């Protein structure tokens, strides 16, 4: 059984066995013209979230530096695999939705708002760099750093609240 091998042994055999499901899919996908004309929405959704699934595979699915699967219910490997897979794809889909929402806010289609966001981001990073340099120079304690972070978060939230009118006027968000 190839799935019970250690990680390094599995990696040696994987390149030989990974072609089997791929060629099987290609064969059945191209078996008739009517099958070729149908789109699989589950594979379409999976294809849209490939970046998120790639990033999350080591955080949700795999543990111990990608040597073992996530164990939710000890002693039931197939149930663990099913639950971890459901969790993995659900979180991947949600992360994709969040990524697209943030992309729309930070890089909107309107060039004026995009330039405004770019300039605002540069200003925020410069201010944060200056504050971190000052805290590093004073050798601030953890409490002082925490208080500065809370204060900066409050100022940032007030700033966003004050200037978020431009984002809400963008036609993409309506």
Image (spheres, rainbow, N blue to C red):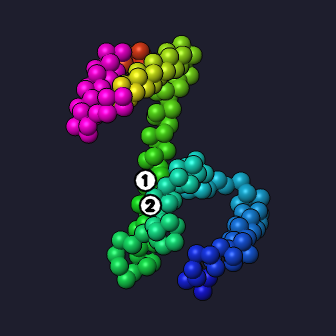
Residues packed near mark 1 inside 10 Å, few (<14), some (14 to 19) or many (20 plus): some
Residue found at x 73% / y 57%: 36
Q: Quadrant of the N terminus?
A: bottom right
Query: Relative to 145, is 4 above or below?
Result: below
Can you tell which quarter of the image residue 90 is in?
bottom left
Q: Which dot marks residue 141?
A: none
Q: Residue at x 36, y 19 (%)?
A: 164
Query: Which x, y percent locates residue 152?
Result: 30, 26
- Secondary structure predominantly adopted by residues drawn in magenta: helix
SS assignment at label 1:
helix
Residue 92 included in the magenta stretch of the image: no
Image coordinates for residue 40, horizontal then vertical, percent:
61, 56
Instruction: Assess disc 2: are there few (<14), some (14-19) or many (≥20) residues with their C-alpha within 10 Å of its C-alpha.
Output: some
Residue drawn at x 58%, y 82% is 5
Q: Is residue 161 found left or right of 83 in the rendered image?
A: left
158 falls in the magenta region: yes
| x 41%, y 15%: residue | 166
User: As rendered, which of 133 and 51 lies closer to the eye?
Assistant: 133
| Residue behind mark 1 | 91
Q: Closer to the observer: label 1 or label 2? A: 2
The answer to whether residue 146 of the structure is visible from this angle is: no
Q: In this view of the protein, which residue sits in the foreground, 90 or 13? A: 13
Q: Quadrant of the C terminus?
A: top left
Q: Which residues are magenta?
A: 136-163
Where 151 falls versus 87 (above or below)? above
Q: Quadrant of residue 18?
A: bottom right
Give residue 86's position: percent from left, percent from top.
43, 63
Give the side of residue 83 with respect to residue 51, left or right.
left
> Does residue 33 lie above or below 28 as drawn?
above
Badge 1 vs badge 2, beta-carbon distance below 8 Å: yes
Cα distance between the residues tagged 1 and 2: 9 Å
Residue under pointer 2: 60
């Amino acid at each position: 059984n190839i799935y019970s091998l250690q990680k390094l042994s599995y990696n040696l055999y994987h390149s030989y066995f990974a072609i089997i499901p791929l060629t099987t899919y290609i064969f059945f996908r191209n078996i008739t013209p009517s099958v070729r004309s149908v789109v699989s929405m589950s594979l379409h959704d999976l294809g849209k979230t490939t970046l998120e699934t790639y990033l999350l595979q080591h955080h949700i699915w795999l543990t111990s530096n990608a040597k073992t699967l996530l164990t939710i219910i000890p002693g039931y490997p197939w149930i663990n695999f099913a639950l971890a897979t459901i969790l993995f794809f659900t979180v991947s889909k949600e992360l994709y939705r969040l990524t697209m929402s943030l992309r729309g806010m930070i890089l909107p289609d309107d060039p004026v708002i995009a330039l405004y966001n770019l300039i605002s981001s540069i200003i925020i990073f410069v201010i944060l760099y200056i504050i971190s340099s000052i805290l590093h120079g004073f050798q601030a304690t953890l409490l002082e750093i925490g208080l500065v972070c809370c204060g900066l978060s409050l100022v940032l939230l007030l700033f966003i609240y004050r200037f978020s009118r431009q984002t809400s006027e963008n036609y993409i968000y309506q």
